[in-house]
Image (tube, rainbow, N blue to C red):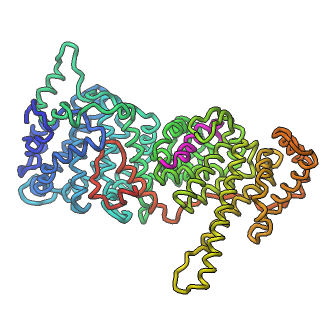
């Protein structure tokens, strides 16, 4: 294949790839490597482009798998890469484009080949391929038994030590991607991997001391959201006179290996939305999530999870606990800003969940922010567009709200933040509304969507728990929010009556026929009554604790007072109905005394006056409503498939054949 090649289909016949995958052993010092690693192409920017590449080179990869036990060429390629990375940092500082370019190409080849090996063989067999010597017979080198560990350490040091410049962007991205590939054996197993060779190397031995620096670097990659430099930046810069030694050398040795990629196909211009993205930030976040969700080793907890749980703000001068060697500091303000900006992605929402749930330093900092609307509004948008989101993303957003509402300070402050013109809320024009009222509206909308569509009890429970946590601090509820609270109760009431009628008819039918199996209406009735009681408790909590702050809720309650009549004598609701019944009776009496044909403004004025006049001791006190999020007993059964589904679906340049995936089904991922 020469420089004029124009088809990706010619790659299997390329002389350099055929020699690499052939039956001949290639010494680490052979000039062949300079020729092999001097290809020039626009790096694939998404999984579709890599799919074309993998399909074109499948025969080459199969040949290498077959011949490597005799040639050891995979190990030789890795050693060539390792030797070149020793001078990588100084090459970046000296702007040595050619050196960095060839090191990147070596790593790109390793990553592509590694994916094929991982897909086609068990991990133990793959490990053997790292030990084969450059001899005709299958023997083993004692000093290369840890070549995997050496490569993993090298990748980590590359990520944390090499400065992020235009010329190093691609090799930094490739290093992160290669670590993701190393850990991708999980994709090919239905069960959660608890014992893995790559896990062992990353969580023990030579890689362990780099834990905190790796986590910190990956977080900063996410925070900075550095855009990909223009194609070719990391290869060479052509001088204005059209030449120069560097350009001449590069074009001279790139004898057409993969220059085909610049002619169309894989190297074609990325779409505008891809140009604006930061693949390094996206891939770094995916790697961070994968590392944080590795299962604990029998003798030690996951160090990456420990690092995420314990890092502190750069402004925090308190000493680190001696029990955690992986703690570090990071700029919380920058992290907060990035999290606010990136919540449209599942990955960023999952990271936010992990930090709020596991890192008390981050949680305390975020709850103390005076601009919480910047974080909460994007979370509400996720829930509002529930139809367009996958269920995992919705769950994460909802749990984040539940965690936030555990804090009374948060529940008070959200009613003090006034928002203007919420354009994405389409059911009603909201020119001005408090963050608290908007939160209530979106959560109630999520409950109603769930009732009519998914009917997920877990979603119901968490929505109601968040409302319950906030209820004692409801303040100055928007009239529309107050209406929606009562409308939800109306919907539940109608559903209760329908199920009750179905149960009654079913019972009558059972008396006349013993052979027909009956639906379990008793269970349905029990579930709906639990939800109704929860809603009554939420309304009661607001009336008991902040009646005088919520005239709009009292107004909505009086307007729909007939809804509550049937529940006054119901044994499941009698106790909780006492306060609600008292409020309805008290304010109805005052309105009757004021006469007929009252305007809305006059009714609200009477309610405000009555709220002051109503003796507080007449309202029965109930235990405070407080619900705390508790993680599942085996969270890895949820989070590991979720994280790998994000890796699988990522637009960053990694391609996974759906026919090979075992961890999750594609239609549910």
Magenta-span inclusion, residue 382: yes
Viewer-side residue, 389 vs 646: 389
Q: State the residue at coordinates (20%, 54%).
A: 130
Percent from the top left, x then y, of residue 505? 63, 75
Q: Position of residue 581 (x, y in %)?
A: 83, 59
Question: Looking at the image, which is closer to me, 335 or 13?
Answer: 13
| Quarter in which the C terminus is drawn | bottom left
Q: Quadrant of residue 430?
A: top right
Q: Is residue 655 above or below residue 268?
A: below
**What range is drawn magenta here?**
368-387
Percent of width and height locating residue 337? 53, 35
State the residue in front, 334 or 639.
639
Foreground residue, 219 or 5?
A: 5
Name, please, the residue furthest toward the top: 241
Most extreme residue toward the front is 512
Give the residue drawn at x 33%, y 49%.
180
Residue at horizontal 47%, vertical 48%? 389
- How many numbered marks appear? 0
List the single residue furthest toward the bottom: 514
Decide whether residue 243 is among the magenta residues: no
Asked whether, in this view, residue 97 is left or right of residue 614, the answer is: left
Tell me if 283 is positioned left or right of 425 in this view.
Answer: left
Look at the image and tell me in which quarter the N terminus lies.
top left
């Amino acid at each position: 294949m020469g420089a004029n090649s124009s088809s990706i289909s010619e790659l299997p016949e390329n002389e350099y790839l055929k020699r690499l995958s052939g039956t001949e052993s290639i010494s680490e010092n052979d000039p062949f490597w300079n020729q092999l690693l001097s290809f020039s192409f626009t790096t694939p920017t998404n999984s579709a482009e890599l799919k074309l590449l993998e399909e074109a080179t499948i025969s080459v990869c199969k040949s290498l798998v077959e011949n490597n036990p005799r040639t050891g060429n995979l190990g030789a390629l890795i050693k060539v890469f390792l030797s070149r990375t020793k001078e990588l940092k100084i090459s970046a500082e000296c702007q040595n484009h050619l050196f960095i370019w060839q090191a990147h190409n070596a790593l790109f080849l390793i990553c592509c080949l590694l994916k094929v090996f991982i897909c086609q063989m068990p991990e133990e067999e793959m490990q053997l391929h790292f030990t084969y010597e450059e001899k005709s017979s299958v023997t083993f080198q004692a000093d290369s038994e840890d070549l995997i560990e050496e490569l993993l350490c090298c990748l980590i040091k590359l990520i944390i030590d090499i400065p992020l410049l235009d010329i190093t962007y691609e090799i930094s991205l490739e290093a992160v991607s290669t670590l993701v590939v190393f850990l991708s054996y999980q994709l090919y197993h239905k069960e959660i991997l608890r014992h893995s060779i790559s896990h062992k190397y990353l969580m023990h031995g030579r890689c362990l001391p780099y834990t905190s620096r790796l986590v910190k670097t990956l977080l900063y990659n996410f925070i900075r959201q550095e855009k990909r430099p223009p194609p070719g930046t990391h290869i060479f810069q052509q001088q204005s006179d059209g030449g120069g030694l560097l350009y001449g050398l590069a074009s001279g040795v790139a004898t057409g290996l993969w220059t085909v990629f610049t002619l169309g196909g894989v190297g074609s211009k990325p779409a505008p939305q891809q140009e604006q993205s930061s693949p390094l930030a996206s891939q770094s976040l995916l790697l961070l999530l994968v590392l944080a969700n590795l299962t604990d080793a029998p003798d030690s907890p996951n160090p990456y999870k420990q690092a995420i749980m314990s890092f502190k703000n750069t402004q925090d001068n308190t000493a680190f606990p001696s029990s955690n060697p992986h703690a570090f500091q990071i700029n919380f303000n920058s992290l907060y800003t990035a999290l606010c900006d990136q919540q449209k992605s599942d990955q960023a929402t999952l990271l936010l969940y992990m930090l709020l749930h596991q890192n008390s330093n981050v949680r305390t900092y975020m709850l103390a922010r005076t601009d919480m609307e910047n974080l909460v509004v994007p979370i509400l948008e996720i829930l509002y567009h529930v139809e367009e989101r996958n269920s995992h993303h919705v769950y994460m957003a909802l749990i984040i709200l539940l965690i936030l509402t555990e804090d009374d300070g948060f529940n008070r402050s959200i009613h003090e933040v006034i928002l203007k013109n919420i354009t994405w809320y389409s059911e009603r024009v909201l020119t001005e509304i408090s963050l608290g009222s908007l939160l209530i509206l979106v959560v109630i909308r999520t409950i109603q969507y769930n009732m009519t569509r998914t009917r997920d009890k877990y979603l119901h429970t968490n929505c109601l728990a968040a409302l319950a946590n906030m209820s004692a601090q409801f303040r100055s509820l928007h009239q529309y929010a107050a209406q929606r609270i009562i409308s939800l109760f109306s919907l539940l009431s109608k559903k209760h009556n329908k199920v009750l009628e179905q149960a009654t008819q079913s019972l009558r039918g059972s008396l006349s026929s013993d052979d027909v199996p009956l639906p379990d209406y008793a269970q349905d009735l029990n579930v709906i009554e639990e939800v109704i009681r929860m809603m009554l408790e939420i309304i009661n909590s607001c009336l008991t604790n902040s009646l005088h702050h919520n005239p709009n809720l009292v107004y909505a309650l009086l307007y729909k007072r007939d809804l509550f009549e049937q529940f006054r004598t119901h044994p499941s609701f009698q106790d909780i109905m006492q306060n609600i019944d008292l409020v309805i009776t008290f304010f109805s009496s005052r309105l009757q005394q004021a006469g007929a044909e009252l305007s809305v403004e006059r009714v609200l004025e009477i309610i405000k006056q009555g709220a002051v006049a109503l003796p507080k001791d007449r309202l029965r006190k109930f235990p405070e409503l407080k619900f705390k999020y508790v993680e599942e007993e085996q969270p890895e059964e949820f989070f590991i498939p979720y994280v790998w589904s994000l890796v699988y679906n990522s637009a960053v340049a990694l391609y996974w054949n759906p026919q090979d995936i075992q961890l999750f089904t594609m239609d549910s991922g």
